[in-house]
């Protein structure tokens, strides 16, 4: 399986068959010094916004990875977009959820300061937390060879989540509606996943008042790190993406 490297300045004009594209900067340094990429190996290069090229490494001189393009395509964003609003959680549980969600094709992730979140992003920690999630998303995109890097939004409150566009599905173990039963309409679906202690009653009331749908998966109560990815897997199947 070929590896994926990102080149944000890549354009459609660059990736016609027979052309040579270059991977530079930190991406190239990682490819050469860590991944030990060599001439003759196959690589995929993406702009992170849908353009994906595949080809053969022709040079690694000067700290630049040159790739001769064999094939290329621009991949439109699938609709509906699937988003994950993930509550901040202790340890690395929220990060595990974000990583898996990226591999499962999520269009964007939103860090949520839920009432029962033990972890808190305040002051400078908010920017650092978002940067950390963005790094996780970027690396998971490369690992899964996705043509699009998901968006990482700033930290959001419950009130902000209730105003999101499109369909909002709140994962709640006690909900009466199953995720497999809910209608999947519109151009965007946001899954809301609570922290370790669950979503507070007044938060559930706020979501319901805003028109969100409370849904459950199965009889088991999943960890905050696995609930979102499990739900995304169900949605990918229902939407015919798997």
Image (tube, grey):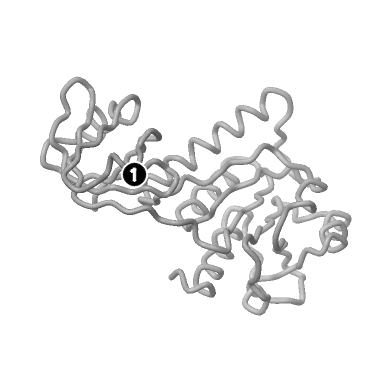
Q: Quadrant of residue 34?
A: top left
Residue neighbourhood size for the residue with mark 1, other residues' Cα within 10 Å, grouped as few (<14), some (14–19), many (≥20): few
Q: Quadrant of the C terminus?
A: bottom left
**Percent of width and height locating residue 2:** 24, 49
Q: Quadrant of residue 232?
A: bottom right
Q: Residue at x 28, y 51 (%)?
A: 72
**Percent of width and height locating residue 211:** 82, 64
Q: Quadrant of residue 218?
A: bottom right
Q: Residue furthest bottom?
A: 181
Q: Residue furthest front?
A: 13
Tell me: residue 71, above or below residue 35.
below
Q: Is residue 189 left or right of residue 142?
A: right
How many discs mark residues in the rendered view? 1
Q: Is residue 74 left or right of residue 165?
A: left
Q: Is residue 135 left or right of residue 217?
A: left
Tell me: residue 224, above or below residue 212.
above
Q: Residue at x 49, y 53 (%)?
A: 100
Q: Secondary structure at mark 1?
A: helix
Tell me: residue 80, above or below residue 9.
below
Q: Residue at x 72, y 35 (%)?
A: 120
Q: Is residue 48 left or right of residue 86?
A: left
**Percent of width and height locating residue 116:** 78, 47
**Percent of width and height locating residue 196:** 70, 51
Q: Residue furthest top?
A: 62
- The residue where tag 1 is placed is 12
Q: Residue furthest left?
A: 40
Tell me: residue 64, above or below residue 202.
above
């Amino acid at each position: 399986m070929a590896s994926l490297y990102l080149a944000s300045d890549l354009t459609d004009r660059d990736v016609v068959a027979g052309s040579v594209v270059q991977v530079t900067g930190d991406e190239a340094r990682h490819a050469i010094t860590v991944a030990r990429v060599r001439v003759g190996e196959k690589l995929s290069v993406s702009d992170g916004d849908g353009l994906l090229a595949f080809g053969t490494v022709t040079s690694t001189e000067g700290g630049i990875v040159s790739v001769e393009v064999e094939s290329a395509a621009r991949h439109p964003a699938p609709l509906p977009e699937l988003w994950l609003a993930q509550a901040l959680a202790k340890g690395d549980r929220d990060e595990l959820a974000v990583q898996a969600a990226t591999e499962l094709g999520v269009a964007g992730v939103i860090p949520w300061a839920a009432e029962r979140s033990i972890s808190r992003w305040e002051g400078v920690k908010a920017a650092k937390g978002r940067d950390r999630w963005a790094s996780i998303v970027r690396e998971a995109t490369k690992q899964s060879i996705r043509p699009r890097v998901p968006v990482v939004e700033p930290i959001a409150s419950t009130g902000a989540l209730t105003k999101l566009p499109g369909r909002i599905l709140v994962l709640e173990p006690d909900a009466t509606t199953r995720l497999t039963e809910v209608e999947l309409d519109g151009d965007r679906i946001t899954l809301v996943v609570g922290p370790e202690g669950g979503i507070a009653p007044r938060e559930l009331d706020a979501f319901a008042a805003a028109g969100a749908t409370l849904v459950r998966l199965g009889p088991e109560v999943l960890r905050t790190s696995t609930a979102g990815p499990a739900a995304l897997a169900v949605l990918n199947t229902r939407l015919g993406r798997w």
